[in-house]
Image (cartoon, coloured by chain):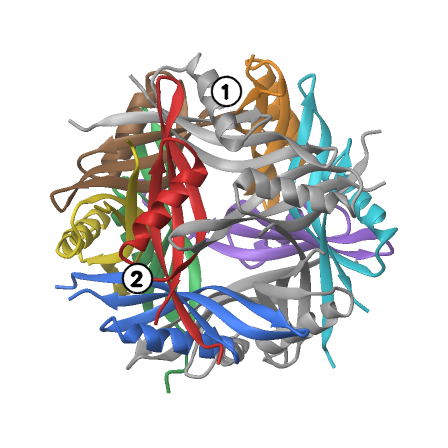
Chain colours: A yellow, B brown, C green, E red, F orange, H blue, I cyan, J purple
Amino acid sequence: MSDKVYKKIEVVGCSDESVENAVALAVAKASQSVRGLSWFEVKEIRGSVRDAKPVEWQVTLDLGFKLD
Amino acid sequence: MSDKVYKKIEVVGCSDESVENAVALAVAKASQSVRGLSWFEVKEIRGSVRDAKPVEWQVTLDLGFKLD
Amino acid sequence: MSDKVYKKIEVVGCSDESVENAVALAVAKASQSVRGLSWFEVKEIRGSVRDAKPVEWQVTLDLGFKLD
Amino acid sequence: MSDKVYKKIEVVGCSDESVENAVALAVAKASQSVRGLSWFEVKEIRGSVRDAKPVEWQVTLDLGFKLD
Amino acid sequence: MSDKVYKKIEVVGCSDESVENAVALAVAKASQSVRGLSWFEVKEIRGSVRDAKPVEWQVTLDLGFKLD
Amino acid sequence: MSDKVYKKIEVVGCSDESVENAVALAVAKASQSVRGLSWFEVKEIRGSVRDAKPVEWQVTLDLGFKLD
Amino acid sequence: MSDKVYKKIEVVGCSDESVENAVALAVAKASQSVRGLSWFEVKEIRGSVRDAKPVEWQVTLDLGFKLD
Amino acid sequence: MSDKVYKKIEVVGCSDESVENAVALAVAKASQSVRGLSWFEVKEIRGSVRDAKPVEWQVTLDLGFKLD
Amino acid sequence: MSDKVYKKIEVVGCSDESVENAVALAVAKASQSVRGLSWFEVKEIRGSVRDAKPVEWQVTLDLGFKLD
Amino acid sequence: MSDKVYKKIEVVGCSDESVENAVALAVAKASQSVRGLSWFEVKEIRGSVRDAKPVEWQVTLDLGFKLD
Amino acid sequence: MSDKVYKKIEVVGCSDESVENAVALAVAKASQSVRGLSWFEVKEIRGSVRDAKPVEWQVTLDLGFKLD
Amino acid sequence: MSDKVYKKIEVVGCSDESVENAVALAVAKASQSVRGLSWFEVKEIRGSVRDAKPVEWQVTLDLGFKLD
């Protein structure tokens, strides 16, 4: 009855603005090729620096979706 | 003289908006039953997805408070 | 040709506002004494609580820069 | 709307029979003092040995429940 | 001669009954889209609770298979 | 027969003197509100510095006790 | 008075049936060469797959015993 | 502007010769089905032994590539 | 010339007094059956509690020695 | 207002006597070249053995200090 | 039928030349006292430095072999 | 007598050729500004890919040296 199987994929979203935006970008992009995304897990937050400022937020996350 | 004992509890705050808001919610809620909260530690950031967008930020955190 | 050596230092940025702001502060401060910062890695997010609210975001991060 | 706060507690269930039974015991026991348990996470599996046989399964788990 | 390349995918199997059954379900489901599965690694065991009983075992596992 | 359930709580003991003393303080304090403590596990050792000397030992530990 | 020294060894038990059986096999086998086994700790659960089914449970565990 | 999304896959390369060669094999193999590989991360190094010699290097690695 | 092989064994020393004493006991005991111990690494510190006091320090450590 | 940046350095203190003494030595030595040390975090405890006794305690620790 | 028990031992191989050579030395040495080694797992890679050059590769590894 | 204090710094060496070469480059570079390097610890191995081949080995390592 409750037997279900999910798959997880690992992606990295990159944004100029914030951690939350990098996650949203990765989720939106992955939704183009995978149906039924249902959760994400943040695994790593890093970024690049230019002129003494953080200029890119790179967020590694796992995305989970149900296998039909 | 500096002998003190703190206790830590683990909570999960959920917010539609951001990581920072999920932490604030968890801290506010825990303050209703525990006196003297003094610090938090973020342990895990995850969330749920609907219609190709992150719709909930679930932040697991430890909260520390002094035992009287 | 691609032989390069980078060094990493560990800093803690503290901000009243957000995780992103704490990182920006740490990066700006470190740039005063180190040339050529090129990336950061968030290692820990914690903070302090007062009056049932998070009042400081303390973000530990590694900063990488190229050795000339 | 989706703003919720959960608390997690850590317990150790001990059973003569199996990992699954040790979890069930811990969940049943904790339900006597906590309302609204909603999930568990297995953190460690160990046990004791007598006469060359495993005689007790000790399962450490986190239990999550909603704060009203 | 012994040069081989394997790929690993991450899935979550859910079962009402036991850890072993959740793994079997995940392996069976994944076999429908991937040829030549050869090993699994259990990464996380969790589940949900209802009426003071564990009612679902959710087992996260890596599945390995040979790339032709 | 061997069916038992234990609960674990996390505390931080602070002492001017030593790691061992910080543990003893935390155990003594926790015993005032919890019956039947039976073991501890050291999870983190840190402290503060003043005038080039360690002046406080802060030891984070888990304490286990049997649920009646 | 309570001065004791234990040694730990690492073994891998393999069973067709279940995690619990793999542990029992490893404990039984190790008891043939070591006296006074007193506890085990599960460190890793993995296995092999054939014909879309898990066909072997490989459980890595630490075994502890008292040094006379 | 800097908004990009990367995906990571996990593979295991096996070589008779060295760690470096096992990575190269895995990268070459994965390039046959994935476009635009840009980095790898070594996660585990293990191997098999025969006649008192290591005869196979099995290197688990993550491979990252840009999603178009 | 510098080719050497060391072996590591894992032991648990138990003492009424202190962490340092538990290590010394484990080292002394292990020296009765192993020649040429050269270093130790503390892996875990735990203990048991009675009458609101820590009454035993159980220190898990790795011991390294040279294979002749 | 609460905007501050701290830096962390990693040192190893070695003492014949105890863990506490090794930390004190490392803190004292580091104070000669760094101003304003404010906390330490113990990361690893190991040591060397001679004549069946631990003869040196090597404690790896992080030291934090405020950047002006 | 598939019931088997393996044992793992931990060794450190040291070589002037390379990681691969340090593993081969450890495997060869261990084969003198243990029959039927079948796999190794690299756990740590470190070494010593003299005159601005790495002069020794110290590789900690687990070795697995079947118990008869 | 055996009281010594070491400091550790974290660097990343990059080489076209091998893991061993990346370590050697990092050690050589760091020796230009630090006296008395005595050991290294490999913490991460990663790299970049071009034309289906690994073209750079990026090795993160800790370097230890004695404080005078």
Q: Secondary structure at mark 1?
A: loop
The amino acid type, in three-letter code, at marker 2 is Lys
**Lateral position of residue H20 relative to residue J17, left or right:** left
Q: Secondary structure at mark 2?
A: strand
Q: Is residue E25 above or below residue I36?
A: above
Mark 2 packing: few (<14 Cα in 10 Å), some, or many (20+)?
A: many
Q: Quadrant of the N terminus of chain A?
A: top left
Q: Which mark is residue B13?
A: none
**Lateral position of residue I32 relative to residue C52, left or right:** right
Q: Quadrant of residue E12?
A: top left
Mark 1 packing: few (<14 Cα in 10 Å), some, or many (20+)?
A: some
Q: Is residue A29 visible from the viewing direction of this image?
A: yes
Instruction: Tell me which residue sits at (35%, 43%) in the image.
Output: E25
Residue bearing mark 2: H8
Q: Is residue C5 visible from the viewing direction of this image?
A: no
The residue furthest bottom is C1
**Lateral position of residue H48 relative to residue I24, left or right:** left
Q: Which mark is residue B67?
A: 1
Find the distance from the CA under tag 1 to the CA under tag 2: 45 Å
